[in-house]
Amino acid sequence: MQTTATLTARERAVTQTYWPLIRGYLVVSFVYYLALTIAHFFHLLGDLSVPYFFAVAPSSLLLGAMTLHCRKPGSIRQLIMVTSVVHGVVLFNTIAGLTIDFNEDKLVYFLIIAMIFAFTSLSQWQAVIASAVAMIALAFEISIHDTQRGVMYAFLALGAAIASSALSYYLRGIIISIAEAEEAAQIARTKAEKRMSEAQTSARLMKKNAMSDSLTGLPNRRAFFDVLEQQVASEAEGWVILMDLDGFKHVNDTYGHVMGDEVLKAVSFRSRRYCEDMCAMSRLGGDEFGAVLNTSMSEEELVEWAQGLLSRLAQIYPIEGRYIQISASIGCCRISHAGSETELFQNADFALLHAKRSGKNRVVTFDDEQARAFAQRFKIEQGLRSAKLKEHIWLRFQPQFCLRTNRIVRAEALARWEHPELGPVMPQLFIEVAEECGLITKLTLAVIEQAIEIVRTQGHELPLSINLSANDLNANQATDAIVRMLDEHSFDPRLLEFEVTETAMLNDLERATQNLKRLAQRGHPIAIDDFGTGYSNYEMLLSLPIDKIKIDRAFIQNPQNPRTEKILRSMVEIARALEVECLLEGVEDELGLLLARRVGLGLVQGYHISRPCSLEALHQLELYSAAG
Ligand code: C2E
Ligand code: CA
Ligand code: CA
């Protein structure tokens, strides 16, 4: 292999270097014999022009044909043949010339011929053979003609042949080695270039692979963040949009993952087509997509554009003989100079989450107010998930005051929580978040555990009231857990009352009623909280095992308004009809208290009696000790 390769390289070097020389030799010879042909044709060179013409004319014809034929460099063999033919023509014409008209001086031609042959031959062998033939021809001429200086010419020609051959031998060696070196360098260059371009191609491919998603061919998460980074750095106006398919899990579960992949591909294809002029839709992973829009679009324009995308995606997908429909939700955030990429992404993600939670198949943009609320809720959620939640929950107690006996008869236990990072969090807020993320029963159990501890130590000194959430009653497991906890301790169930709002009962009235009855049957009093604000259904009130209604504090916000008194009176009537106790919440002053007495209420609760306070503070209340 090695030898062949070097040989071809050498051959190429030789042919390339010698080609111009050989062609020059051919062309010059052709021109020379053509000129002679013309000259002899017009009898310009003496009386013997006619025989001369018949010698040179075919020579020039032959050389002309060869000149036309050999326009491109050929192989070494071809070159040797060409030179041999030209050598032959030259020799033939010299001999012909001498034969037609011998002249001793013309023997000098052999000297020139010897030199030309030596220099134009491609190898030393060719040079030696050509020179030898010329020398033989010379010897022949000398032998048949009577010459005086023939021997001298023979020696001169021989000397010229030897000298030229030796000289051309060395020259050829040098030329070939230079050509070889050049050829080798050229080969090395070509190889290097080839390798370089291969490396460039594979680097491009690698970059493309690293930046694109293999399933859909869309740019991937990395590419998305690259673009986002550039957009933020350029300080140009724009939007980040995140898109998530609604119910994609269902597609996977119902039709299998292969079909799921097809749906993803189809969604990607449509998204790419829709976004083409605006941005590049990227697949961030799973069924989540994202894009960065470099545009000064207003919020309305953006929402309209994004809604267009959603309706495009919601059209039916015919895939493998099935007809699949899927919707998506989009969250957007304006790229302002203030935010980092991560912040922008998080904000768009919050918007997306909001879109998902507020019913899906919609576009939600992110604004600052939402940002804070969401970030806070997110942290609250994380905090509530902590295993140590129980240790961070404690209780405050707000007394319920009996207007007939003038004593505190019960206290409502209200949960308090301090977030390790955010500090104390408003109960309404953390309870709402706990309800949203299904953590409320964990909280309820923590409250009940502490309340049981208190009633077990305080006994009839201090009955408590505990708030239940919709989730605590709508899921059987939640109520099971509560009942289990209650069963674990022995105490008078009348000491622990449960408060529940009408709205909490509504989700699944039947189940909630059933679960509430389980508590009532254990002997726990049941109170309807925030009475009058929710959806009051007379039938519902009749079917529930109620012991008390707690009129919401909204009803006493305008104590001077004559209507307040009328309404309160009618509520007292309802309680009487239902044969349950009636409590007014939110009694903040003397006026409220007077009103409560006037309308015939049995119980009040509110800041006027006491704010929610610690157990110790509760015991120090005058009203409490009076009761004791
Ligand atoms: P709620 O059950 O209606 O509790 C009464 C709320 O009204 C308490 O707010 C209390 O501080 C407030 N309040 C009492 N008297 C007055 C008054 O005279 N004027 C005014 N303006 N407000 C008064 P808090 O403690 O912030 O609790 C808010 C809500 O959080 C409670 O409303 C209840 O729905 C919920 N909550 C509190 N603790 C728990 C709990 O352990 N479990 C559940 N599920 N919910 C709880
Ligand atoms: Ca309550
Ligand atoms: Ca209430």
Image (spheres, helix red, strand yellow):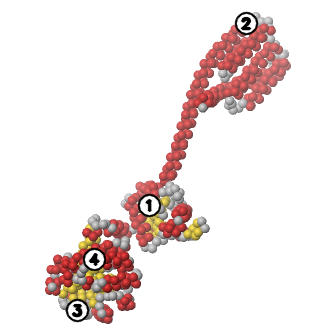
Q: Nearer the viewer, mark 3 or mark 1?
A: 3
Q: Position of residue 304 (x, y in %)?
A: 49, 69
Quadrant in the rendering for residue 458: bottom left
Mark-to-mark CA distance, 3 and 1? 64 Å
Q: Nearer the viewer, mark 4 or mark 2?
A: 4
Give the mark count. 4
Kindly state the secondary structure of the residue where label 4 is placed. loop
Mark-to-mark CA distance, 3 and 2? 161 Å
For residue 597, the mark is 3
Mark-to-mark CA distance, 1 and 2? 100 Å
* Residue position for label 1: 237
* Residue position for label 2: 151
Q: Amino acid at mark 2?
A: Val
Q: Position of residue 310 (x, y in %)?
A: 51, 69
Q: Nearer the viewer, mark 3 or mark 2?
A: 3
Q: Nearer the viewer, mark 1 or mark 4?
A: 4
Please name the residue shown 58% across and 24% down the image: 177
- 387 and 128: which one is in front? 387
Mark-to-mark CA distance, 4 and 3? 40 Å
Quarter of the figure that contains the N terminus: top right
On screen, residue 253 versus residue 620, left or right, reads right
- 281 and 259: which one is in front? 259
Q: Amino acid at mark 4?
A: Glu
* Residue position for label 4: 488
Please name the residue shown 69% across and 27% down the image: 77
